[in-house]
Amino acid sequence: MEDHGKQLIQHIADMQEEEAAKLAREMLDSGYDPVKLLGHCREAMEIVGKRYEQGEYFLPELMLAGEMLKAIGDMAKPLIPQDASDGQAAGTVVIGTVQGDLHDIGKNIVVFMLEINGFKVVDLGIDVPIAKFVDSIKEHKPQVVGLSGFLTLAFDAMKKTVEAIREAGLRDHIKVMIGGGQVDDTVKIYTGADAFGLNAMDAVSLCKHWVPT
Amino acid sequence: MPTDLRLSLTLDDIVSSWGHHTRLTSSRGRAMLSELLARIETNGWVEPKINFKVYPVVSSGPGWIELPGRSRLFSTALRHHLPGALYVAAGVCTIGAALEQQVSNWFAAGDRLRAVLLDEIGTLAVFRLGDQLEERIQAEARERGMDASGVLSPGEDGFDISQQAPILELACGAEIGVWQTATGMLIPRKSVSVLVGFGTHMPHWSRAERCARCGARERCPHRRPQMIEVAK
């Protein structure tokens, strides 16, 4: 059975979707621990993430791996006893593309990757007014806020959003990550964010670091 | 406005743009790509349109050129990239809004892989259309007995995004349904605006060279050399 685990990791990491789904089904049908199986999935996703960062994989592979993980998760989760799975999300992330920017692809991918990694994500959409971020933070009490923006002019909107969060007295309780386009350490300092991410996997790593599961 | 545009992409074009090592193409993704290409054709999700206009350069100085009607373009890139330009062509191209609307619809419906694949196809399509725009501008320069420079686009290093509005206006983007937001973003999003200089011995550069000097190169999801070659 341990060999099956390794094989499952390899199938997912190598984008062998049908083989991965079939093996996962067989493993669960023969009584394999569903929690352990999901652990293999996470391990496989880490390999996919590394290949993505190294430029071997691109967005479609990342999304396909995410879909495989979701499909296998849907098979395994109903088999996990209630006391082993309390249904709690790893943490809550409020995310949106800042005011004045309509780009949504990158943000949508980050949302998906966070969700399959166990986070509850409140997606505010695109061209999000500053007040909407503040209201959403009050309502959902997230641990992390993600500000997305592709345009360089979005940096001003990010800065104003962070300032508004601070003025509302909410800044000390949350971490702010920015992403999209040309963000770097200089932009992070300019906007008053805590960190920046260059891709969806960075966003997941940051959230996992800030909200240990 | 040219109306004889043809923009067709094949499965091999898409696969090649990702590089031949990609593993997705051997699984469900390959079938999905074929399906998407067929649906683009059937539903008319790609509506290629280009427009460009040529203007004489009235005067120029360090970092600016003046066109008729006292309109001026400003950029540190102009002196270096369009030295001695006698005319400039302002152009814009778009594949329309239908494809990106479908991408949004699929994301909203949770069909994310299909959405990302369609978006990738759209990006490659607008790259190719941009190449057609450049070719037609070059042909116009030849007809006038001049050389065309390489292409500059607002937002590139040295050509500030603030120049998007004047370029779009000069290119008469509204004639093909392209407009810009207050922050300089083109709508539909799968659109590109360009400025090209006409003159003698104008410097020329390829898409690969534009990519090589782009500040976002290290993090750009489209930095793949294969995509650049396919777009050619």
Image (cartoon, grey):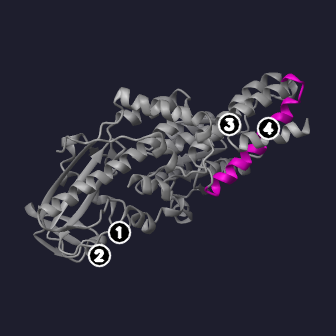
Q: Name the residue under label 4.
A: A8
Q: Which residue is at 69% across, 29% downward? A: A71
Q: Name the residue under label 1.
A: B158
- In magenta, the rendered stretch is A29-55
Q: Distance between the residues labelled 3 and 2?
A: 48 Å
Q: Within the image, what quadrant is residue B156 found in?
A: bottom left
Residue contact between numbered discs 3 and 1, judged by CB atoms under 8 Å:
no
Q: Which residue is at 42% across, 63% downward? A: B208
Compare residues B59 and A33 and report the one nearer the observer. Answer: A33
Q: Is mark 1 on a helix, strand or loop?
A: loop
**Mark 3 against mark 2, which lies toward the viewer?**
2
Looking at numbered disc 4 in the image, what kind of residue is underneath it?
Leu
Q: How far apart are marks 4 and 2 (CA)?
A: 55 Å
Q: What element carries label 4?
A: helix
Quarter of the image with the N terminus of chain B in it: top left
Q: How far apart are marks 3 and 1 (CA)?
A: 40 Å
First-in-chain label (2 vs 1) = 2
Q: Is mark 3 on a helix, strand or loop?
A: helix
Q: In the rendering, at what x and y percent does residue B183 appear? A: 34, 51
**Mark 4 against mark 2, which lies toward the viewer?**
4
Left or right: A211, with B175 as reference point = right
